[in-house]
Amino acid sequence: MCDAPLTLVYAPNDYARQFMRVLKAQGKQAAAVVNSARQQKILEGYGINRFVRLDTKAAECPLQSGLIGDVYLFDDSFPLTCRYIRLIKPHVTGRIVVVLQSAGIPALYRHLGADKLCHEAAHPYQLLLEDEESEEGHVC
């Protein structure tokens, strides 16, 4: 078993799935966040085989603190992104990065615990580079 913390990715679109492939190519331990069997089955069709299933209606998160490093939430639903941040934040040792593609409310994401907000880059690899280069709490 690897001692490196797990990177979580909410991957509701093709850009996010490409990002997961980049993480895998770099040898990072990554898992897709899902909240339903349907979501998991769709991602399995794209070759993603590691999952963390979270009930976004639950009051508590079943994740064990210290096992989750960075989290990348690709925003396609404002309420869902907010629920994921609320559930995951207490268990993350790294940062929560929200990747914006639509009109969310950045100030609320930050208030809930997002460390960084980014817009989709031309290629998912650029997102990792921008993430490493930009300062915490800023939009990249």
Image: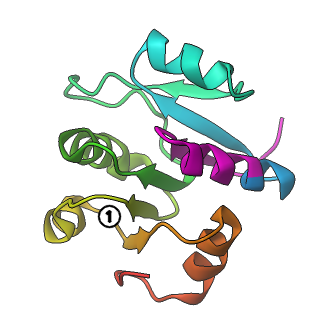
User: Which picture quadrant has residue 104?
Assistant: bottom left
Extent of the magenta region: 1-21
Tell me if 1 is positioned left or right of 102 in this view. Answer: right
Depth check: give the residue in front, 83 or 124: 124
Depth check: give the residue in front, 85 or 105: 105
Q: Residues within 10 Å of mark 1 (few under 14, many from 20)?
A: many
Q: Residue at x 30, y 49 (%)?
A: 85
Tell me if 122 is positioned left or right of 36 in this view. Answer: right
Residue pointed to by mark 1? 114
User: Which picture quadrant has residue 122?
Assistant: bottom right
Which secondary structure lies at badge 1?
A: loop
Give coordinates of residue 79: x percent, y percent: 18, 41
Is any atom of residue 67 visible in this view?
Answer: no
Give coordinates of residue 131: x percent, y percent: 56, 76
Tell me if 54 is positioned left or right of 131 in this view. Answer: left
Q: Quadrant of the C terminus?
A: bottom left
Tell me if 56 is positioned left or right of 20 in this view. Answer: left
Depth check: give the residue in front, 86 or 23: 23
Q: Residue at x 33, y 45 (%)?
A: 76
Measured along the vertical axis of the image, is residue 43 above or below residue 116?
above
Q: Residue at x 65, y 67 (%)?
A: 123
* Residue type of the residue flagged with mark 1: Ala
Give the farthest residue toward the front: 122
Depth check: give the residue in front, 7 or 72: 72
- Counting every numbered tag in the picture gives 1
Q: Quadrant of the N terminus?
A: top right
Coloration mode: rainbow
Q: Examine the structure image and report whether residue 101 is included in the region drawn in magenta.
A: no
Measured along the vertical axis of the image, is residue 81 above or below residue 98?
above
Measured along the vertical axis of the image, is residue 93 above or below residue 118?
above
Q: Residue at x 51, y 59 (%)?
A: 93
Give coordinates of residue 108: x percent, y percent: 14, 63
